Amino acid sequence: MADEKISRSRTFFGEEGVAGFTHRAFTKAMGFDDEDMQRPVIGICNTASDLNNCNRNLTEVAQAVERGVWQAGGFPLTFPTISLGEIFLNPTSMLFRNLAAMDTEEMIRAQPIDAVVLLVNCDKTTPAALMGAASADAPTIMVSGGPMLSGHFQGQTLGACTDCRRLTAEYRAGELDEDTYKEIEDGIVRSTGHCMVMGTASTMNSLAEALGIALPGNGAIPAPDARRLRLAEASGRRAVALAESGTRMSDIVTREAFENALALLAALGGSTNAVVHLPAIAGRLGIDLPLSLFDEISQRVPIIANMRPAGAYQMEDLFHAGGIPAVMRQILPHLHGDALTVNGKTVAENAEGAKIYNEDVIRPLDNPLQPEGGISLLQGNLAPDGAIIKHSCASEHLMHHRGRAVVFNGFADLQARLDDPDLDVNENDILVLQNAGPVGGPGMPEIGNFALPRKLLQQGVRDMVRISDARMSGTAFGTIVLHVAPEAAIGGTLALVQDGDEIELDVPNRRLTLHVDDTELDRRKAEWTAPDPQYTRGYGKLYLDTVNQAPLGADFDFLRGKDPVQATEQPKF
Ligand code: FES
């Protein structure tokens, strides 16, 4: 064993005097002995919570990791960090992603651990943990809790939460009665685990394989499947090896690893939220991931995973078809095959033995679901720093569309007027939502896929162009322009749009244009006043004062960039 690589725990347990005495005495109070304290200490960072169904199984996953750590000669110690569940957090879980990242970073730095296992699952828990771990830059491996089983209703497969929205729209339109709607509610979420379509959690937990930070198979093994526990146990064993070799997160998660993640994102038709989270993680490692790189890789890598919401299948189907290793094998020509991963093998070596059991779920490169990846970068005077659209989930007839703006100046205005029978709106209009970005939301909530006006739904309209500075759930469907930057709340052009302006969306040419001349825009800008800040104290104020715009991942400005003082060099008190 290379003792110098596990110097962090040695510093705590091997120290002279009263400090070492108390560290050892309080560890012995937990039932451990001197021999345990000679082993590499593996911190298991657990985001299990009873308020987060997606991460509920992580207590059992942690036990499996602990077994693996003991088997490999390590000393496992599990500790909690903030758990961010999409369903209950108010006003939006994204507001707290950076807080959770700070919690993770500081707990890794502060405690006597030689390597860390990150246990994550729901949408924000994965990027938060990876951001914090990237800043701490200890030897790191990630294990997610896995996707839920597929939902069922009267013989149909249901997906959370693509079908939550689709069927609620049917209910709002009067197409479903109360009893049927209730029956769907009973059957759509069948187990613990994250949402099982290719939403944000499925995307981020799959991309962890391409980043090399999770073992092959991590992305798709269903949460209740015993193979997830076996993967967790193997991850525990690998964490000990990483501690002993001193392999840091930055040795694995390199620029090439991010480019692999972008290729996998394209191949999966993954969530638009990856376009926020990946730059935030990369930024912590001093790596710049411009939106143009997403667009460039997306244009050359086709969507080969036939996954909802862009395609037909769900995570359980992807697992049985071969899982993420099989997808990576198909797109190997687009990957840096020599990139190192946490199991000590390269991406190419991991993909080598992968098998594809269903070529309708995981398509060959020459018979893709769509000829290019699903996310496009849009630019123009309405989004000088960029906006994105998930065109793989949008309506073909709206890919080039010019229409009249119907503007809502915030979510409260949207809620108050959207279903007003007197609202002047028709299906060719473009719905614009302002003040829903990182500062304006605040927290860039997932409301970009807001509902259509009820009166249009009742006329059979199911999609319209919607534009905002918000995000949307990765499980959503529609012609939805997101992440407009700069956002409205800091005076971006989006703030200047008025009812009746002409807007042109041109996806083939990647353009988003507000057809209002510069003189008029300058006049409106001179009259514009910023909305009142929604927080004047506490974490909310810190967030408003320091959050970056979407293209930089909506991270805090003071957390971007590599820490010049490495974790192992921190003074110990
Ligand atoms: Fe957690 Fe959907 S609610 S992933």
Image: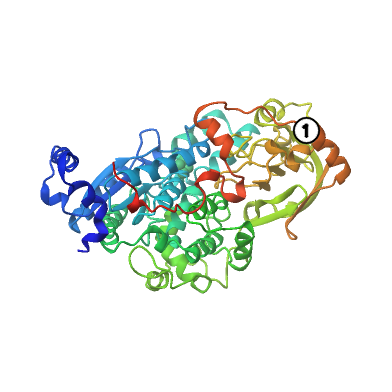
Which residue type carries mark 1? Trp
Q: Position of residue 255 (x, y in %)?
A: 50, 64
Image quadrant where one finds the C terminus: top left
Image quadrant where one finds the N terminus: bottom left
Q: Looking at the picture, does residue 276 appear above or below residue 263?
A: above
Specify the farthest residue to the front: 17
* Side of 347 where 393 appears, left or right: right
- The residue carrying mark 1 has its beta carbon less than 8 Å from ligand 1: no
Q: Position of residue 118 (x, y in %)?
A: 35, 49
* Side of 24 where 555 appears, left or right: right
Tell me what residue is drawn at x 38 percent, y 73 percent: 349
Q: Position of residue 347 (x, y in %)?
A: 42, 69
Q: Looking at the picture, does residue 531 appear above or below residue 192?
A: above
Q: Position of residue 339 (x, y in %)?
A: 43, 69
Tell me what residue is drawn at x 45 percent, y 70 percent: 329
Q: Nearer the viewer, residue 250 or 420?
A: 250
Q: Nearer the viewer, residue 241 or 365?
A: 241
* Side of 290 where 111 appears, left or right: left
What residue is pinned by disc 1?
528
Q: Residues within 10 Å of mark 1 (few under 14, many from 20)?
A: few
Could you say which quadrant of the image residue 494 lies in? top right
Whether residue 153 can be seen here: no
Q: Looking at the picture, does residue 523 appear above or below residue 422?
A: below
Whether residue 383 can be seen here: yes
